[in-house]
C-alpha cells in the first residue's frame, strides 16, 4: 500500500515527459498531487491509532550484501508527516505560477522531491532511508537554482553543501549503528544497540544530532536556511520549510530519541539549551529583518526550536507536542510563504519600508492581508488556531523537565507576536502609497491554496484531537523507552526517588517477511 | 475664447512648475492636453452632473422648505415640485440657455431614483434605508466646508453677521415656529443656536444656486464632446471659462417659504453674485481646503480656531489621496459612488481596460474626477487672471510679467508634497 505513495510521484515525471503539449503540465500535476494527498488521507483513515506498532508494512529483499532492503512501514510519527507532505505538495503546485517556464521539468522535480520525502518517512531500513534522504536533495537543488530569485545560485550551492554534510554525518552514524551494534543489519527492527558503550552511543548520537540538526536547522548550523528560503520560490520554500525541515526533526526523534533513549536523557539538557537558543535567536533575528520573507525564514528557526526543546524533554506530552508542532508549523509556514510570495508577486517588493496599506479594500490585497494577519496569529499561538494547540502541548510537556528553556520558549512566543505585529502593521496597515499601488488583483486560483491551509489551521486548532489522535500511541511508546517517570508523577512528587529505567520497547514490530 | 500671444515675450519661468505655467500662459490648463485626459474629464463631468442635478434641487429644497425642521428625516426625499423645478440655465424657459436639454430633473436621475442601483421597484423609503440613493451627504459636506472656512472672499459671509440678516432670520424663525411654543421657547433661550442653523441654511441655498449653474454647463460640455465639438482640454477649459463670465452676475440669495409666504433672508437686492459669493468661495473651500478626516484633527469654527492660512488646509480634491477609501476631507467615496451610476459607456470601457477594471472603478473615476477638477480650477485661475491681471495676448511685457507672477503665486499652492498637480501630469496616474 505504501509503495503506491512512492510509485505515484515517481511516475508523474514520466507521464509529464510523455504527455502531449496540449495537456497542461500544471493540470496533470495538480491532479496527481491531489490524488496522492487523497490516497495518503485514505491511508490515515485506515490507520489504527490505538497501537504503536508499524502498519501497512512492506518488506522485500533488495541488495543483501550491503544490508539494503525495501522495507516500508508507518507509525503515528511518520504517517501524519507523510500526509503533511502530500498536502503541501498539492498546495505548492496550486500556488506555483500559472505560466511556469520549463514547467514539465519543474513539476517533475517537485514530485521527485516528494517521493524522496515520503520514502524517507516510510523507510524502515537505514540505507533505504538514506537513499530517499539524499534523493530529495537533487530536485531541491535544481528547484532553487533554476526557479529561485535573487542570489539563488549561491543559495542552491549552500543548500547542497550543508545537506551533503548532513548526509555524510548521518551515513556515518548509520554505519556505526549497524556495524557497532549486535545485529549488523540496517533494518530498523534488527537494530540492537544494547552492547554499545556509553561513549560510542554518545558519538553516534552526536553525529545524528548534528546531521539532522543541519536539516532542521538548529543553531549554529542554521546559516543556510534564511538564504535558501529567501532565494527559493514561494512554492519551493513552502516544501523546504513545511516538509523538508521536518525530516530533520523526524530524524532526531526517530534516530535520536527512539534509538538512544538513555543517552538522549543524558544529553537532553544540552539539546534543550540549543533548542531554546534557536528559539530566541530565530525570534530576535526575525524582529531585525526588513525583508518579510527573511523574517518568516527566521521565524521558522525559532519555531523549530520548540520542537527541539519538546523532543529533548521527552515526556509524553512534550513528544506529542513536538509531533503536533511539526504539523502545525508545516501548515502555518506554508501559509506564510504562500502569502509572502503573493505580496511579492503583486507588490514587486518584500521590503518592509516600501510595503504599506495592503489592507486597502480596493487597490490593496485585502484578503491576502487578512490571511496574513491570521497566519501571524496562528504562528504566535493565538487560541483557536493550530499553533496554540501544538505550542501549549510543547510548553506543558517540557516545563516539568526543563523549566528555564521552556520559559524562554514561552517568552519567545511573545516575541513572535512582536515581529508579526511589525510585519502586519508595516505591510497591511497604514496608507497605501499612490506611486506604488497599482498592484494586480489576486485571482481566486491564487487564493485557493491559502484558503485550504487556513481551513486546516482553524479546524485543527478548534479540534486538536484530529491532529493528535494518530500520534499518541506512538509517542507514548517512545517515551516509555526513555525510562522517565510519567510527567504527572514528576510534577506532583518531585522529591520521590527516580524510577529505575526500563528497557526500551522494540523500535518496531518485525515485518511479516 | 482666451486670446493668446503668438510669440513668447518673456524668458522661461524658473518656477518649480515652469512647464505648467508656460502652458497656462499659452491659454492651456494645468491638465495636459491629450485625448485620454479629455475623455476622462468630459465623461466625469457628465457623470457628476446627473447627481449634481439632484444636489442643487435638494439643497434648495432644504434651504427653502425643510428649513429648521427639528426632525428632518425626509430632507432627502425630494418632492415632485423640486424635481420639476426648471433649471434657470436649461430648458425653453431659461433666459440664458446653457444646456440644450430640458429644465426638469435629468431623465437618468429620475430613472435612478425610481429603481436605484438594485434595480428593484421598492418603496422610496426602502431604497433610502438600503442607501441605494443619491448621496446628499456629499453635497452637505461641501456646504459645510464653505460654512466652515467662511471668509473665502465676497461679502456673503460678512452679511450673515449683519443686523439685517439677523432681523430677516428672526422673522423667518418666528414664522416657522409660530405654532410650536416649545421651539419658540428654545429660540428665546438660545437665539444664537437657531441663527447659526439659518446661516448654515443660507449656505445650502448658496451652494444649491452655484450647482444649478454647473449641472447644465457639464451636460452641455458632454453633449458637445459627443458631437465632436470639444476636441481638446483647452477647449473644455474655454467653455468653462466663458461660462464663468456668462453667469458671473447670477444673484445669490436665500428665500424661505413658510405657509405659502416667501421670507427673503438674503434678498436678491443684496447684490450678491454667483462668481464672487458662490463660485470662488466654493473652489477655495472645497477644491483646496475642506477639512481633515474626522478624528485626526478638530477645530471649533465658532471659537475662531480655524487658521486663515491655506497651508494648514490641504484636504480638498486637488490634494486628496483617493486611494485609501474615505480618508479625504470631503467624503469622496460618496460622490464616487454617485458618479459610478451615471458614467458614460465610453468611460466604463476605458476603466475596464486599466488597473483592476470594475473592481477599482471607484478609484479610477475618483482620479479622473481629480483631473477634471484641475481643469475647472484652471478655468477659475484663468478667469481670475482676466479679472485681476491682463489678457494673455497683451503686448506689454510688464503686463505679461504680472500675469506670470499671478500664475506662479497660484501654482505655489501646489508645492505641497501631497498636491496631485504633478500626478495628473502623468497619464499612468489612475
Image (cartoon, coloured by chain):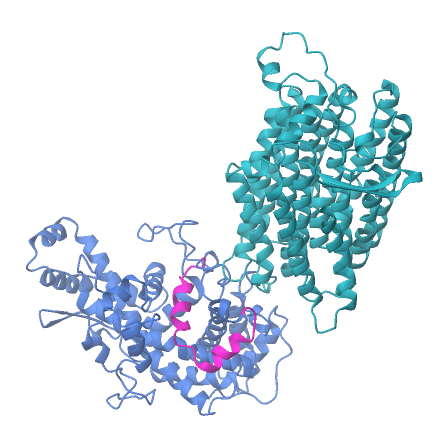
Tell me the magenta residue range.
B327-356
Q: Report the residue at 57% width, 63% height from top.
A: A443
Looking at the figure, which quarter contains the C terminus of chain B?
A: bottom right
Q: Is residue A211 left or right of residue B6?
A: right
Q: Is residue A429 left or right of residue A17?
A: left
Indicate the position of residue A236 as horizontal and vertical percent values.
72, 52
Indicate the position of residue A432 as horizontal and vertical percent values.
55, 57
Q: Is residue B184 above or below residue B288?
A: above
Q: Report the residue at 34% width, 74% height from top.
A: B52
Residue B237 visible (yes or no):
no
B335 part of magenta stretch: yes
Indicate the position of residue B401 as horizontal and vertical percent values.
56, 77
**Which chain appears cyan?**
A
Q: Is residue A335 left or right of residue B103?
A: right
- Quadrant hosting residue A493: top right
Residue B419 visible (yes or no):
yes
Observer-nearest residue: B179 or A388?
A388
- Quadrant hosting residue B20: bottom right
**Which chain appears blue?**
B
Q: Report the residue at 59% width, 51% height from top.
A: A427
Amino acid at each position: 500500500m505504501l509503495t503506491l505513495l512512492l510509485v505515484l510521484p515517481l511516475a508523474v515525471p514520466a507521464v509529464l515527459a510523455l504527455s502531449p503539449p496540449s495537456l497542461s503540465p500544471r493540470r496533470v500535476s495538480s491532479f496527481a498531487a491531489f490524488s496522492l494527498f487523497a490516497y495518503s488521507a485514505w491511508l490515515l483513515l485506515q490507520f489504527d491509532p490505538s497501537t504503536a506498532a508499524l502498519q501497512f508494512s512492506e518488506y522485500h529483499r533488495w541488495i543483501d550484501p550491503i544490508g539494503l532492503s525495501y522495507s516500508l512501514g508507518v507509525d503515528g510519527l511518520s504517517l501524519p508527516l507523510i500526509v503533511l507532505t502530500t498536502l503541501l505538495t498539492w498546495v505548492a503546485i496550486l500556488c506555483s505560477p500559472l505560466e511556469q517556464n520549463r514547467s514539465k521539468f519543474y513539476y517533475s522535480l517537485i514530485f521527485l522531491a516528494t517521493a524522496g520525502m515520503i520514502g524517507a518517512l516510510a523507510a524502515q531500513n537505514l540505507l533505504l532511508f538514506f537513499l530517499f534522504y539524499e534523493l530529495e536533495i537533487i530536485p531541491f537543488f535544481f528547484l532553487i537554482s533554476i526557479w529561485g530569485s535573487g542570489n539563488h545560485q549561491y543559495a542552491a550551492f549552500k543548500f547542497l553543501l550543508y545537506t551533503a554534510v548532513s548526509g555524510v554525518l548521518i551515513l556515518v552514524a548509520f554505519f556505526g549503528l549497524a556495524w557497532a551494534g549486535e545485529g549488523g543489519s540496517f533494518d530498523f527492527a534488527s537494530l540492537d544497540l544494547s552492547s554499545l558503550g556509553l561513549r560510542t552511543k554518545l558519538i553516534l548520537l552526536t553525529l545524528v544530532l548534528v546531521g539532522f540538526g543541519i536539516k532542521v536547522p538548529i543553531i549554529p548550523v542554521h546559516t543556510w536556511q534564511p538564504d535558501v528560503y529567501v532565494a527559493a520560490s514561494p512554492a519551493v520554500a513552502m516544501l523546504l520549510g513545511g516538509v523538508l525541515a521536518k525530516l530533520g526533526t523526524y530524524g532526531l526523534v526517530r534516530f535520536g530519541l527512539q534509538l538512544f533513549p538513555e543517552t538522549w536523557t543524558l544529553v537532553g539538557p544540552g539539546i534543550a539549551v540549543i533548542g531554546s537558543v534557536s528559539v530566541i535567536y530565530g525570534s530576535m533575528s526575525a524582529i531585525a529583518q526588513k525583508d518579510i520573507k527573511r523574517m518568516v525564514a527566521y521565524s521558522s528557526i525559532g519555531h523549530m526550536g520548540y520542537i527541539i526543546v519538546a523532543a529533548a524533554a521527552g515526556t509524553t506530552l512534550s513528544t506529542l507536542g513536538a509531533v503536533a508542532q511539526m504539523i502545525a508549523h508545516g501548515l502555518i509556514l506554508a501559509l506564510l510563504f504562500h502569502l509572502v510570495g503573493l505580496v511579492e508577486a503583486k507588490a514587486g517588493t518584500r521590503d518592509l519600508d516600501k510595503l504599506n496599506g495592503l489592507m486597502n479594500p480596493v487597490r490593496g490585497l485585502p484578503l491576502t492581508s487578512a490571511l496574513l494577519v491570521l497566519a501571524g496569529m496562528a504562528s504566535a499561538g493565538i487560541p483557536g488556531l493550530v499553533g496554540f494547540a501544538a505550542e501549549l502541548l510543547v510548553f506543558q510537556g517540557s516545563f516539568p523537565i526543563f523549566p528555564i528553556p521552556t520559559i524562554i520558549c514561552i517568552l519567545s512566543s511573545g516575541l513572535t507576536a512582536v515581529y508579526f505585529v511589525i510585519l502586519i502593521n508595516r505591510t497591511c496597515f497604514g496608507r497605501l502609497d499612490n506611486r506604488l499601488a497599482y498592484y494586480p488583483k489576486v485571482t481566486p486560483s491564487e487564493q485557493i491554496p491559502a484558503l485550504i491551509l487556513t481551513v486546516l489551521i482553524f479546524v485543527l486548532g478548534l479540534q486538536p484531537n484530529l491532529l493528535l489522535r494518530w500520534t499518541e500511541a506512538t509517542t507514548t511508546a517512545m517515551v516509555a523507552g526513555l525510562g522517565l517517570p510519567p510527567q504527572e508523577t514528576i510534577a506532583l512528587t518531585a522529591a520521590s526517588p527516580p524510577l529505575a529505567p526500563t528497557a526500551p520497547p522494540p523500535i518496531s514490530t518485525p515485518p511479516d517477511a | 475664447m482666451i486670446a493668446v500671444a503668438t510669440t513668447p515675450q518673456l524668458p522661461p519661468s524658473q518656477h518649480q512648475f515652469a512647464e505648467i505655467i508656460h502652458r497656462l500662459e499659452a491659454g492651456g490648463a494645468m491638465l495636459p492636453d491629450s485625448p485620454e485626459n479629455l475623455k476622462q474629464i468630459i465623461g466625469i463631468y457628465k457623470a457628476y452632473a446627473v447627481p449634481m442635478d439632484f444636489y442643487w434641487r435638494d439643497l434648495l429644497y432644504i434651504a427653502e422648505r425643510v428649513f429648521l425642521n427639528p426632525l428632518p428625516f425626509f430632507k432627502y426625499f425630494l418632492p415632485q415640485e423640486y424635481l420639476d423645478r426648471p433649471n434657470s440655465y436649461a430648458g425653453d424657459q431659461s433666459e440664458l440657455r446653457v444646456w440644450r436639454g430640458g429644465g426638469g430633473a435629468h431623465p437618468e436621475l429620475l430613472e435612478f431614483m425610481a429603481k436605484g442601483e438594485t434595480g428593484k421597484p421598492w418603496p422610496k423609503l426602502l431604497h433610502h434605508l438600503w442607501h441605494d440613493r443619491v448621496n446628499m451627504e456629499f453635497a452637505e459636506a461641501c456646504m459645510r466646508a464653505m460654512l466652515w472656512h467662511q471668509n473665502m472672499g465676497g461679502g456673503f459671509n460678512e452679511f450673515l453677521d449683519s443686523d439685517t440678516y439677523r432681523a430677516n432670520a428672526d422673522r423667518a424663525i418666528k414664522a416657522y415656529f409660530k405654532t410650536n411654543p416649545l421651539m419658540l421657547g428654545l429660540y428665546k433661550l438660545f437665539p444664537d443656536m437657531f441663527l447659526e442653523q439659518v446661516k448654515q441654511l443660507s449656505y445650502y441655498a448658496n451652494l444649491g444656486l452655484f450647482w444649478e449653474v454647473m449641472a447644465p454647463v457639464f451636460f452641455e460640455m458632454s453633449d458637445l464632446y459627443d458631437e465632436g465639438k470639444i476636441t481638446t482640454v483647452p477647449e473644455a477649459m474655454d467653455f468653462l471659462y466663458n461660462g464663468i463670465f456668462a453667469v458671473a452676475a447670477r444673484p445669490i440669495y436665500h428665500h424661505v417659504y413658510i405657509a405659502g409666504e416667501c421670507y427673503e433672508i438674503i434678498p436678491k437686492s443684496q447684490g450678491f453674485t454667483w462668481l464672487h459669493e458662490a463660485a470662488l468661495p466654493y473652489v477655495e473651500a472645497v477644491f483646496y481646503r475642506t477639512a481633515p478626516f474626522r478624528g485626526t484633527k478638530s477645530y471649533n469654527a465658532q471659537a475662531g480656531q480655524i487658521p486663515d492660512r491655506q497651508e494648514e488646509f490641504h484636504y480638498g480634491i486637488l490634494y486628496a489621496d483617493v486611494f485609501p477609501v474615505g480618508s479625504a476631507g470631503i467624503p469622496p467615496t460618496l460622490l464616487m459612488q454617485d458618479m459610478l451610476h451615471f458614467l458614460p459607456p465610453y468611460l466604463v470601457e476605458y476603466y475596464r481596460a486599466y488597473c483592476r477594471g470594475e473592481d477599482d472603478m471607484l478609484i479610477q473615476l475618483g482620479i479622473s474626477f481629480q483631473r477634471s477638477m484641475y481643469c475647472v480650477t484652471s478655468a477659475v485661475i484663468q478667469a481670475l487672471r482676466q479679472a485681476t491681471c491682463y489678457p494673455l495676448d497683451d503686448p506689454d511685457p510688464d503686463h505679461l510679467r504680472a500675469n506670470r507672477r499671478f500664475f506662479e503665486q497660484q501654482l505655489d499652492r501646489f508645492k505641497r508634497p501631497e498636491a496631485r498637480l504633478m500626478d495628473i501630469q502623468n497619464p499612468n496616474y489612475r
